[in-house]
Image (cartoon, helix red, strand yellow):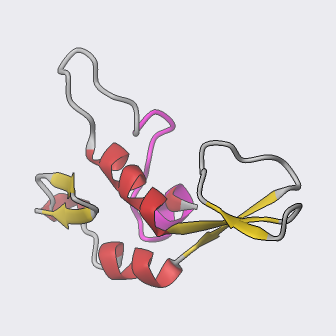
């Protein structure tokens, strides 16, 4: 969803964009945006009829991921990659500098 959202705004994201750059020892900005995006989703477990909090254990045809597109657009709607030098994710807050 995040890749499609960014592509829809003219930001091309490569398949490995969220991979840590081991040679430099740092995480790219896309990785930080993905980590932040995990905080704005809700997981509904169809089988149990309850909200689930474990995004890392998704099961086919059992869980539905609901993304707050409003929050996504509030944070990234004005994104212009050429104007961003740094992406920070601290304390649940995403900052584009």
Report the quarter where the N terminus lies.
Answer: bottom right
Residue with the most extreme top position = 23
Q: Does residue 52 lie above or below 70 as drawn?
A: above
> In the drawing, does residue 15 fall left or right of residue 46?
left
Q: Residue at x 51, y 60 (%)?
A: 2
Position in image of residue 41 (x %, y %): 54, 67
Q: Does the magenta stretch mainly form a helix, a strand or a loop? A: loop
- Seen from the viewer's position, the closer of residues 89 and 13 is 89
Q: Relative to residue 82, is residue 16 drawn left or right?
A: right
Is 14 situated above or below 90?
A: above
| Residue at x 19% of width, y 54% of height | 87
Number of marks in the rendered image: 0
Query: Residue, x 43% and y 62% (percent of image)?
Result: 39
Say if 41 sits above or below 12 in the image: below
Residue 27, x across and y down, in percent = 26, 35
Residue at x 20% of width, y 22% of height: 25
Percent across and percent down for residue 50 are 75, 69
Specify start and end residues of the magenta stretch as a single range: 3-17
Between 60 and 7, the one nearer to me in the picture = 60
Is residue 11 part of the magenta span, yes or no?
Answer: yes
Residue 33 located within the stretch drawn in magenta: no
């Amino acid at each position: 969803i995040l890749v499609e959202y960014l592509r829809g705004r003219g930001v091309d994201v490569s398949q490995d964009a969220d991979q840590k750059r081991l040679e430099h020892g740092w995480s790219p900005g896309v990785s930080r945006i993905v980590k932040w995006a995990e905080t704005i989703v809700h997981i509904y477990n169809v089988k149990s009829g309850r909200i689930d909090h474990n995004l890392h254990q998704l099961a086919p045809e059992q869980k539905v991921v609901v993304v707050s597109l409003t929050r996504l657009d509030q944070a990234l709607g004005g994104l212009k990659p050429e104007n961003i030098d740094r992406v920070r994710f601290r304390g649940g807050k995403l900052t584009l500098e």
